[in-house]
Image: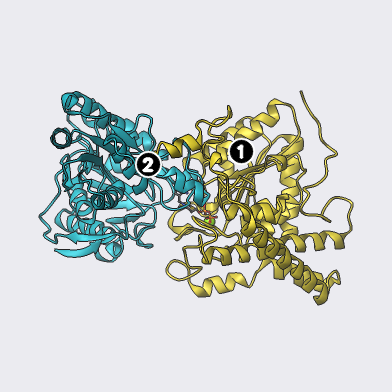
Chain colours: A cyan, B yellow
Amino acid sequence: MTVMTYRDALNQALREELKRDDSVFLMGEEVAEYDGAYKVSRGLLDEFGPKRIVDTPITELGFAGVGVGAAMVGLRPIIEFMTWNFALLALDQVVNAAAKMSYMSNGQFPMPMVFRGPNGAALQLGAQHSQAWESWLAHIPGLKVVTPGTPADAKGLLKAAIRDNNPVIVLEGEMLYNTKGEVDENPDLIVPIGKAELKREGDHCTIVTFGKMVLVALQAADQLAKQGVNVDVVDLRTVRPMDVDAIANSVAKTNRAVVVEEGWEVCGIGAQVVDYIQRECFDDLDAPVVRVHQADVPMPYAKNLEKLAKPDAAKVIAAVKRVMYLGD
Amino acid sequence: MAKKNTSSPASPAVQGAAAGSSARDTAVGYMHSMLLQRRFEEKAAEAYAIGKIGGFCHLYIGQEAVSTGTLSVLRSDDYVITAYRDHGLALVRGMTPRTVMAELFGRAAGCSGGKGGSMHLFDRKLNFLGGHGIVGGHLPIATGVGFAISYRGGDQVCVCFFGEAAVNIGAFHEALNMASLWNLPVVFIIENNRYGMGTAIGRSTAQQDVVKRAAAYAMIGTSIDGQDVYGVHDEMAAAVERARKEHRPTLVEVRTTRFMGHSMSDAASGTYRSKQELDESMQRDPIQLLKKKMLADGSLTEEHFAKLDEEAKVAAQDAWDFADAAPEPAPEELFAHVLSDGPTADTAGYVEAGR
Ligand SMILES: Cc1ncc(C[n+]2csc(CCOP(=O)(O)OP(=O)(O)O)c2C)c(N)n1
Ligand SMILES: [Mg+2]
């Protein structure tokens, strides 16, 4: 085990998989000479050369399509979006091509490719640059969507994504890149797609979360513990396919649940989680499930409004107390 | 309902440049306009460094002759739209330094109520249609503005600014094709500073002579030196006239240099652009070029320049002081303007519910 940043964990995953399989290549804006807009691909150009680490023009739709074409004929592309906000321009290729090619061709053309990059808000980047797209992407049959919240999961899930024979969306976080954690350096280890992890155990309430909100939930859990409230933190890690058993097992134990996500409420991932809970755990519940999410507004720039709009530990704590019928 | 506005005054901020004023007034107006942008942004950089401005902040320093020269030919009922590198254009169009700085500081008095930030400056009264953050995203919008002008039978013009790296995104092709096909009064202005973030044009663009693309849309294309404010003025006057009178769009490439990094989080030179290259380009500072010309033709003295410069610095400091003291947006603003029907939720209730 080595302590490293989320950024370095991703970098290590890329390096190991590029080394392992020469059909893997990385393509995107500023990934090569600039080392990546967020330096995730640092050093890869030097090590693997410009054939495999490819800088593109600002043409998201175009290079996403290049990835699809290359995957159709046997390569394993990793397409980096500088941020997922810009991937909106490429959604036609992601949704209409990558997600459907296997099905439309009756399995003749699998899509062994990865679309990755930072998702969600950082700090004061304003409305067009602060958006979390998990639920949009998870809506699409034919895609897998992973949302690592820790360095170990970042490495393991990215490796699994690269090895997967389907299009896998990897949603990273600008605010996560500098966070640190223990990572296994064994190049054969992966984190399986579709498996949640119990990041913390407690009997009183379940917090279901993923991605950037894992850290927020853990912070909330720490503070709650000081007040005698112990929570399970179920980190989904993959939002499609979702590990329903992990959710149900926890809720069966605690009888209460809070779902925390970075994005908007309406038709969010949390709505899907609540649906699974009401189906699988109806008789277990002692309280309605409460959701924590971004305010239902485009992200404002002003610092005070942005803070108000974002989910944070205080909001998670308030939600847990609500489902436990505890006052302040 | 065609509303003809042929007698509207020139853009308010480039005073002295209006038709009929003396050559000397015009030159002084240009100088004032460029100095204001320069000193304002130097202040903004200072404020960014100490955390008073957050997020992304893209400075225009080095490109000021483009905004000053172009907007000097516009009428106040014409339209301006640009990308995220928008402070200079906003100031030249007539936003006050106070309202722009307040926006950068995220204050309620900002031109977008503090909700837009550096990349999203808007002012409806000045027909300033933003500040847009997605590369190329505003080009079809400019075509749409041209469509509306034509639809109403007006004779306004829309000028649309974007970087050279934006010519590679699909929206560029789609926007220019429609503008030409439908004879729309739009001037598409490529501010070619040769870099899109850390990527030199030669590494992103097959046809580096970007103005050649005009031919693909049967559009007139011209290429000019963006450091010479007079040259910019003259070429833009022709393009704007073509749009206004002949309803034909033009593609203008303006060759310029950004003296700073792509944004505040990026060094001016180093990995992707050599210091030597930047130093050479900076020899052609648009302010210094104009100053030299004016000193030579006697329209400016060193003392007058110092006075203009001091005025610009005072205005920038005043903007800072104003923004710094201005209140943040009220919490109720969180849900205001999501839709035009009024607030979509009650902030107090939202806070109380602990969401
Ligand atoms: C669609 C899209 N992709 C990527 C980005 C990130 N990005 C912001 S500015 C920029 C470079 C643009 O360069 P250019 O068009 O030359 O304008 P300049 O910054 O030089 O003014 C990039 C890649 C973005 N904002 N939008
Ligand atoms: Mg550029």
Q: Is residue B337 above or below residue B305?
A: above
Q: Does the residue labelled 2 lie within 8 Å of ligand 1?
A: no
Write the residue at 83% across / 40% down.
B8
Identify the residue under disc 1: B142
Say left or right for B13 vs A194. right
Which is more toward the observer, A284 or B69?
A284
Farthest front residue in view: A327
* Picture coordinates of residue A196, whole percent (x, y): 17, 42
Horizontal side of residue A173 vs B180, given as left or right: left
- Compare residues B47 and A229 and report the one nearer the observer: A229
Occupied quadrant, residue B231: bottom right
B182 to B207, vertically: above or below = above
Instruction: Determine if residue B31 is in view.
Output: yes
- Residue picked out by circle 2: A132
Query: Would you identify the image quadrant in which residue A319 lies?
Result: top left
Q: Where is residue B353 in the image (x, y as percent from the top left)?
A: 41, 36
Q: Which type of secondary structure does the marked residue at label 2 adopt?
A: loop
Q: Which chain carries label 2?
A: A
Chain letter for mark 1, please.
Answer: B
User: Does dot 1 land on a helix, a strand or a loop?
Assistant: helix
Q: Which amino acid does label 1 sit on?
A: Ala
Report the side of B224 relative to B22 (left or right): left
**Viewer-proximal residue among B310 and B139:** B310
Q: In x, y percent, where is residue B300?
A: 83, 71
Amino acid type, residue under disc 2 in the picture: Ala
Q: How crowded is mark 2: few (under 14 residues within 10 Å), some or many (20 or more)?
A: many
